Image: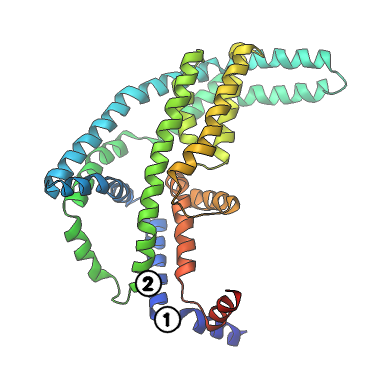
């Protein structure tokens, strides 16, 4: 057993470049896993600086120095954040509170519909089992119980102190990351091993792909969210802002997100209109938006993305989402692509090389 392991280790890690790459990846993974809470403002600032580097680079091409370009980009970015904070979030909050308050009446309407179905099709629905399910549902969706859960989630997820720290530290960190990018990168190199050519190769391969993915995902969120909100607003659907935002954010979770957000949209439309023509038109329009997103928008935005099997994408969402929450879900596909790039760049053994030559 030891001989087999020793042979495998010699084949896979005999190249110092491979050892360096593995050490860098393991080091970053350990830092993020164990110190993500402490370093959260720094990590958020790094991600934002990575995204905002492109407009700064375009300004440099126009002859604007880096300090002025970074300042202008930060001002524009903060303006967008303020606009969202005071324009969109209050509407989403009000509609969310209204939806929670309306849950009891929506449940009563649903129960009446179920009772009608029982009377019409008693051979398919067992009244006793349905009564038991209804009792448990009433307990679960009791108004006070739902409100208590919402208050607890709000208290845990958005304390005032954390928001203040983020609001002050993150913009400052982003500005300095953009302004002093070259100096910071040059200074950080001395903390990495000298033989890092393989790690540099992987980074160069992933850099543009990660940027294209994040940029495309942001555009997809905005386009799908705005298009869905317009449809809901024109149709007069209640909670249109809330449901539009949820639909836009649902694209963060491939395959699963669209399925999850369809359920509340269907329920709200049914409780508002029943099985009417309005209900049919709304679901038809919503289906068209989802079809255009999957068959037109996604191929255009992610034409340069690494080709990953749907099973791998879902597995990446589950694994990285479980490790790092929302950020893990957002970066699941780039991280899965990084793993694939590392595997492709890893030095091949003699047997694998000969097998590849034979296959070609």
Residue at the (12%, 47%) spot, across then down? 63
Most foreground residue, 148 or 179: 179
Of residues 21 and 148, the one drawn nearer to the viewer in this rendering: 21
Instruction: Measuring from the top left, give residue 50's x and y in whole percent.
Output: 29, 50
Residue occupied by mark 1: 15
Decide which of 257, 58 is in the foreground and name it. Answer: 58
Q: Residues within 10 Å of mark 1 (few under 14, many from 20)?
A: few
* Residue 302, numbered circle: none
Q: Earlier in the sequence, mark 1 or mark 2?
A: 1
Position of 272 with respect to 45 (left or right) is: right
Q: Residue at x 63, y 12 (%)?
A: 277
How would you rate the neighbour count of disc 2 (Cα within 10 Å): few for under 14, some for 14-19, many for 20 or more?
some
Q: Residue at x 35, y 35 (%)?
A: 159
Is there CB contact under 8 Å for labels 1 and 2? Answer: yes
Looking at the image, residue 298 sits to the left or right of residue 130; the answer is: left
Q: Residue at x 60, y 52 (%)?
A: 311
- Rendering coords of residue 134 (x, y %): 71, 22
**Quadrant in which the N terminus appears:** bottom right
Q: State which quarter of the image contains the C terminus.
A: bottom right
Q: Say which element carries label 2.
A: helix
Q: Is residue 161 above or below residue 66?
A: above
Image disc number at residue 198: 2
Side of 334 relative to 181 (left or right): right
């Amino acid at each position: 057993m030891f001989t087999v392991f020793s042979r495998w280790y010699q084949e896979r890690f005999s190249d110092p470049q491979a050892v360096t790459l593995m050490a860098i990846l393991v080091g970053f993974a350990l830092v993020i896993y164990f110190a993500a809470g402490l370093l959260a403002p720094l990590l958020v600032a790094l991600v934002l600086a990575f995204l905002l580097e492109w407009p700064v680079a375009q300004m440099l091409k126009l002859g604007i120095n880096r300090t002025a370009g970074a300042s202008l980009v930060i001002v524009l970015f903060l303006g967008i954040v303020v606009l969202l904070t005071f324009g969109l979030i209050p509407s989403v909050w009000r509609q969310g509170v209204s939806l929670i308050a309306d849950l009891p009446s929506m449940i009563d309407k649903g129960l009446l519909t179920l009772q009608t179905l029982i009377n019409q099709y008693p051979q398919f629905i067992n009244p006793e089992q349905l009564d038991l399910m209804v009792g448990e549902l009433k307990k679960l969706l009791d108004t006070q119980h739902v409100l208590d859960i919402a208050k607890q989630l709000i208290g845990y997820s958005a304390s005032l102190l954390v928001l203040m720290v983020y609001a002050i530290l993150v913009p400052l960190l982003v500005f300095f990351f953009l302004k002093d990018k070259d100096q910071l990168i040059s200074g950080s190199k001395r903390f990495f091993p000298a033989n890092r050519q393989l790690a540099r190769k992987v980074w160069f391969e992933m850099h543009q792909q990660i940027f294209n993915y994040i940029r495309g995902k942001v555009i997809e969120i905005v386009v799908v969210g705005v298009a869905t909100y317009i449809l809901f607003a024109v149709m007069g659907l209640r909670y249109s802002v809330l449901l539009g935002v949820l639909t836009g954010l649902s694209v963060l979770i491939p395959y699963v997100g669209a399925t999850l957000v369809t359920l509340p949209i269907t329920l709200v439309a049914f409780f508002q209109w029943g099985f009417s023509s309005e209900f049919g038109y709304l679901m038809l329009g919503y289906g068209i938006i989802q079809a255009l997103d999957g068959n037109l928008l996604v191929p255009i935005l992610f034409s340069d993305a690494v080709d990953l099997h749907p099973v791998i994408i879902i597995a990446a969402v589950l694994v990285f989402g479980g490790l790092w929450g929302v950020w893990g879900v957002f970066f699941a596909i780039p991280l899965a692509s990084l793993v694939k790039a590392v595997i492709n760049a890893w030095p091949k053994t003699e047997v694998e090389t000969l097998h590849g030559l034979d296959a070609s």
